[in-house]
Image (cartoon, rainbow, N blue to C red):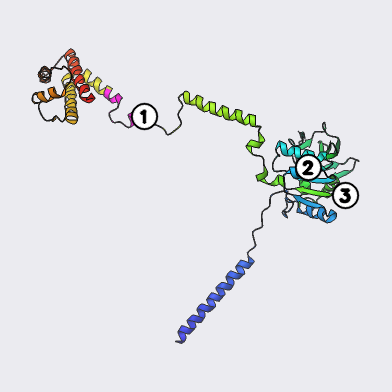
């Protein structure tokens, strides 16, 4: 009895120790960090821009995240700043026009993109080196990292804000009452780089922090893949119609050209034991060895099998005993008695000429056709 009680206590202590071990292991296991897309304002990861958003919100109390299409931007108000950091896609033409209308109403867009070509008619040039030194408008020199190999074309802009010895890094362009500020260094604004070198000072100069913005929008609409333009929005309707018609005509042309799409068809000679090639070879062998009697016998036996299958005339009966049955079945003017007598006479010979063979082969084949057709 005492042994049984001791055993129960041991099991209880073992279960308690195991439960404690599992609890400690669960508590000590680090949680998997949440993954965030790059350049989003709620991301604390190194590639996010939450630090900049928090800083601007604390300094101005005017920072907001913008998750809506650009047609909802308030165009009647001015003195608003929209910051677009490394868009995941180039908006459709209609949406780009909405952004332009937003600027024309007196607002400003700051576009930070490694290669902004294709947006707002911006053109870029290719650079090959990174000097690590950036010059401002007033000749001030800043230390900064530039990962982009692109520089901005200055032929269609109003002012160059930042540049290095390779080309323009940040430019400004006027849209009626508003402005577009473009820079090819989005990495300056990320959490991991914003406090490195002079990145914060450069970003604040582009944001123009001394300006009392009514609202500072961080555009998150451009980071959602579901907002990317589809095929029907990227291309005009007339081009889609022409493309569809071209595909349709190509299919019809291939169809009339004899092209077929489907499973592979196995050649007949690979599946049929006695293929046409073998029949031809067998016929050549009979002809070469002048086995005319054997060939006629084979034809006659085949006809007898057909007679049994089609008309019920026994294969085992002799030709001479089926004369009346043949006469009752045949509709042609074939002289059955003469045919049977002549066939038996030929089949009993040891050798026949080729002419005789051809003649009787045609007669037997004619009988075969009549039996098969009825």
Q: Helix or strand or loop: what does disc 1 sit on?
A: loop
Left or right of 153 in this view: 342: left
Specify the segment rendered in magenta.
265-279
| Residue name at image x 47 percent, y 23 percent | 256
Q: Quadrant of residue 293?
A: top left
The x and y percentages for residue 60 are 85, 53
Give the residue number, with chain letter if any, for mark 1.
267
Q: Is residue 144 visible?
A: no
Label 2 – label 1 distance at C-alpha: 64 Å
Of labels 2 and 1, the one closer to you: 2
The x and y percentages for residue 222 are 71, 44
* 269 drawn magenta: yes
Q: Residues within 10 Å of mark 2 (few under 14, many from 20)?
A: many
Give the residue number, with chain letter if any, for mark 2.
111
Q: Nearer the viewer, residue 162 or 337?
A: 337
Label 2 – label 3 distance at C-alpha: 19 Å
Left or right of 119 in this view: 233: left
Q: Nearer the viewer, residue 295 or 2?
A: 295
- Decide: is 288 above or below 20: above
The x and y percentages for residue 187 are 76, 46
Which numbered disc covers residue 212? 3
Label 1 – label 3 distance at C-alpha: 82 Å
């Amino acid at each position: 009895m005492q042994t049984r009680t001791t055993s129960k206590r041991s099991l209880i202590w073992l279960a308690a120790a195991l439960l404690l071990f599992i609890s400690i292991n669960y508590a000590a296991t680090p949680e998997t960090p949440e993954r965030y897309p790059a350049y989003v304002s709620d991301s604390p990861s190194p590639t996010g821009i939450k630090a900049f958003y928090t800083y601007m919100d604390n300094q101005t109390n005017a920072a907001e995240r913008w998750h809506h299409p650009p047609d909802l931007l308030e165009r009647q108000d001015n003195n608003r700043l929209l910051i677009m950091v490394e868009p995941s896609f180039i908006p459709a033409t209609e949406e780009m026009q909405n952004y332009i209308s937003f600027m024309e109403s007196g607002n400003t867009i700051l576009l930070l993109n490694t290669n902004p070509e294709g947006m707002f008619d911006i053109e870029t040039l290719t650079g090959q080196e990174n000097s690590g030194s950036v010059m401002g408008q007033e000749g001030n020199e800043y230390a900064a990292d530039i990962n982009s190999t692109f520089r901005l074309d200055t032929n269609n802009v109003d002012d160059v804000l930042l540049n290095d010895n390779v080309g323009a890094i940040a430019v400004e362009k006027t849209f009626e009452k508003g402005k577009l500020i473009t820079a090819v260094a989005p990495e300056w604004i990320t959490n991991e780089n914003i406090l490195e070198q002079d990145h914060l000072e450069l970003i604040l100069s582009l944001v123009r922090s001394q300006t009392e913005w009514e609202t500072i929008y961080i555009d998150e609409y451009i980071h959602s893949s579901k907002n990317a333009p589809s095929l029907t929005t990227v291309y005009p309707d007339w081009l889609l119609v022409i493309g569809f018609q071209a595909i349709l005509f190509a299919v019809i042309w291939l169809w009339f050209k004899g092209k077929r799409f489907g499973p592979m068809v196995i050649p007949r000679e690979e599946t049929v034991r006695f293929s046409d090639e073998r029949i031809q070879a067998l016929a050549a062998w009979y002809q070469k060895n002048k086995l005319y009697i054997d060939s006629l016998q084979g034809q006659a036996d085949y006809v007898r099998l057909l007679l049994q299958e089609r008309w019920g005339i026994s294969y085992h009966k002799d030709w001479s005993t089926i004369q009346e049955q043949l006469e009752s079945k045949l509709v042609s003017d074939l002289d059955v008695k003469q045919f049977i007598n002549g066939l038996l006479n030929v089949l009993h010979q040891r050798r026949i000429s080729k002419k005789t063979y051809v003649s009787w082969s045609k007669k037997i084949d004619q009988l075969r056709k009549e039996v098969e057709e009825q």
